[in-house]
Image: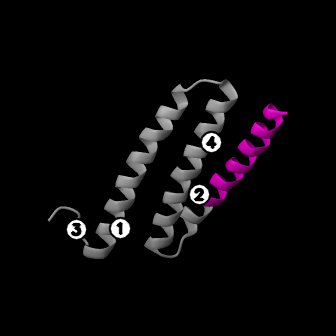
């Protein structure tokens, strides 16, 4: 039962990643593209966690944590770039 649920959720997350990629490519503004990229890394974290549940190993949880930290820092950097036009002052 758990395996079928994991497969269904993985398929849904792959569809969500494809839709995020679509918004990243055709986004009319920079803000749309940055939000699509932010949502893509959140969905990829979820996909990695689902894969870790499927394989029953805690190694993927640590990888997802590292991606989450890098994604947060990159979102802050992109936001600062949009507000000020410069990241390093």
Local secondary structure at mark 2: helix
Kindly report the distance in space between the C-alpha atoms of the residues bearing marks 4 and 3.
33 Å
Callout 4: 10 Å neighbours few (<14), some, many (20+)? many
Q: Which residue is mark 1?
A: 79
Kindly report the distance in space between the C-alpha atoms of the residues bearing marks 2 and 4.
15 Å
Most frequent secondary structure within the magenta stretch: helix
Q: Which residue is mark 4?
A: 47
Image coords of residue 76 (percent x, y): 34, 61
Q: Nearer the viewer, mark 4 or mark 3?
A: 4
Q: Is residue 32 magenta?
A: no
Image coords of residue 49 (percent x, y): 60, 38
Mark 3 or mark 2, which has the lower sequence index?
Answer: 2
Please name the residue shown 60% across and 45% down the image.
46
Left or right, 54 with reference to 87? right
Q: Is residue 3 magenta?
A: yes
Local secondary structure at mark 1: helix
Kindly report the distance in space between the C-alpha atoms of the residues bearing marks 1 and 2.
20 Å
Mark 1 or mark 2, which has the lower sequence index?
Answer: 2
Left or right, 52 with reference to 28? right
Q: Which residue is mark 3?
A: 86
Please name the residue shown 49% across and 58% down the image.
38
Left or right, 3 with reference to 80? right
Q: Nearer the viewer, mark 2 or mark 4?
A: 4
Q: Which residue is mark 2?
A: 21
Image coords of residue 42 (percent x, y): 54, 52
Task: Tell me the magenta residue range.
Answer: 1-20
């Amino acid at each position: 039962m758990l395996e079928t649920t994991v497969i269904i959720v993985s398929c849904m997350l792959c569809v969500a990643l494809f839709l995020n990629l679509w918004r990243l490519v055709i986004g009319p503004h920079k803000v749309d593209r940055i939000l699509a990229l932010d949502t893509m890394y959140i969905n990829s974290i979820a996909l990695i966690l689902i894969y870790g549940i499927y394989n029953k190993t805690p190694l993927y949880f640590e990888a997802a944590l590292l991606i989450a930290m890098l994604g947060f820092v990159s979102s802050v950097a992109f936001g600062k770039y949009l507000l000020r036009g410069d990241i390093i002052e």
